[in-house]
Image (cartoon, rainbow, N blue to C red):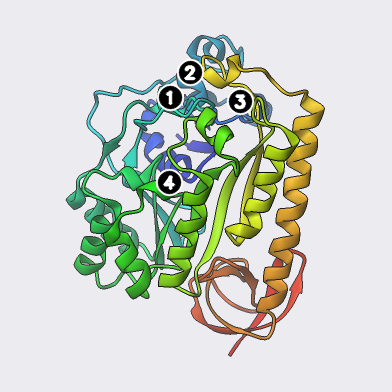
Amino acid sequence: MSVQTITLGCRLNFAESEAMRSLAPAGEDWVIVNSCAVTAEAVRQTRQAIRRARREHPTARILAAGCAVQLEPERFAAMPEVDRIQTRDFTAPLTVAAGYLSRVRSFVAIQTGCDHRCTFCTIWQARGPSRSLPFDAIRVAVATELDKGAKEIVLTGVDITSYESGLGVLCRRLLAAEPRLKRLRLSSLDSIEIDDALFELIGGESRLMPHFHLSLQAGDDLILKRMKRRHSRADAVRMVERIKAARPDATIGADLIAGFPTESEAMALGSLQLLGDCDVVAAHIFPFSPRPNTPAARMPQLEREIVKARAARLREAATARRNAWLDGLVGTTQRVLIENNAKGHSDSFAPVMIAGTSRGEIGDARIVGRDGDQLIGAWA
């Protein structure tokens, strides 16, 4: 019997896919498709992945699970390619999900679900209320991943800044309990929830990697209010200023939505300008797509061509900023972890290739050039 997984969507999904292997009944070959529902395009890609899995594995049974399946179980159960669906039980005890993307960087889930009700989002419906895993379970999972050879641990979840005892407290306890943990990285953060304990670590703990991806979503206060976000534009700018003051080498990533309902050209320009105001060098740009049963889907929608054009403009500006940042790293020395195929990332999450290297190598590299979105380095 073999069990293969196909994962779409976020880093939490990648971690959970490993745990999903136990969902497949014994005695048969299975393909598990772990779905995503963050956008209409993600749902389309999920259905496409299921059809491709059936073509490529004609004799295997296909199990569909994940967020898209949770929201539309009947739709996925009706697909002729699907043999079984699996939905979540929000009352079941949580288990730590951990898994590799590159065998040296491991994603460990610390939390799932969300208590917020952003008007564009269905994830709170797909994953239920916020629930945090106990510290001891997380500590054991991290130790297990380090035993397997992980060199970097990424804490992930739906809303990790809502961790019940505080994300900063969790990180501090984890770093104290596991001295082998030399590289700790955080997935997406809700900037309004960053606590004082985390700021202390940002400013004083070298083992916490200095790249912080923030869920900003928009650069206009009225749009943020209509999204039901809990921060203002000024809050976002001040947060980045505070991070940079605590850690001058910190780099900023951000999620931004283009073409939210009622967004005017002036409002869209506010998001465009936010890239510079928050010094964003790694932007994830999402063209707005209405999700079923959300307040934003009932708001006055923009024409799709306008949405696409604004997303393209944001991506173009974000790419220009990223290219300038990468160019500025040429000639510097960066600490790099090689993850796979001689490629890895610096502490600030710049992608670096060093020819002739092996998975798991860590060292200081001189950055000698750039090839597209990839820096070229040589061990210093």
Residue occupying the point 60% across, 44% down: 219
- The residues bearing labels 4 and 1 have C-alpha atoms spaced at a distance of 19 Å
- The residues bearing labels 4 and 3 have C-alpha atoms spaced at a distance of 24 Å
Q: Nearer the viewer, residue 363 or 187?
A: 187
CB within 8 Å, label 2 to label 3: no
**Mark 4: secondary structure:** loop
289 left or right of 139 in image: right
Say which residue label 1 marks. 126
Say which residue label 4 marks. 190
CB within 8 Å, label 1 to label 2: yes
Q: Please state which amino acid type lies under the numbered disc 2.
A: Leu
**What mark, if any, has residue 71 been given in the picture?**
2
Q: Where is the C terminus found, in terms of image quarters?
A: bottom right
**What mark, if any, has residue 43 been given in the picture?**
3
Q: Please state which amino acid type lies under the numbered disc 4.
A: Asp
Q: Please state which amino acid type lies under the numbered disc 1.
A: Ala
CB within 8 Å, label 4 to label 1: no
Q: Dot 3: within a 10 Å radius of its alpha carbon, few (fewer than 14), some, or many (20 or more) residues?
A: many
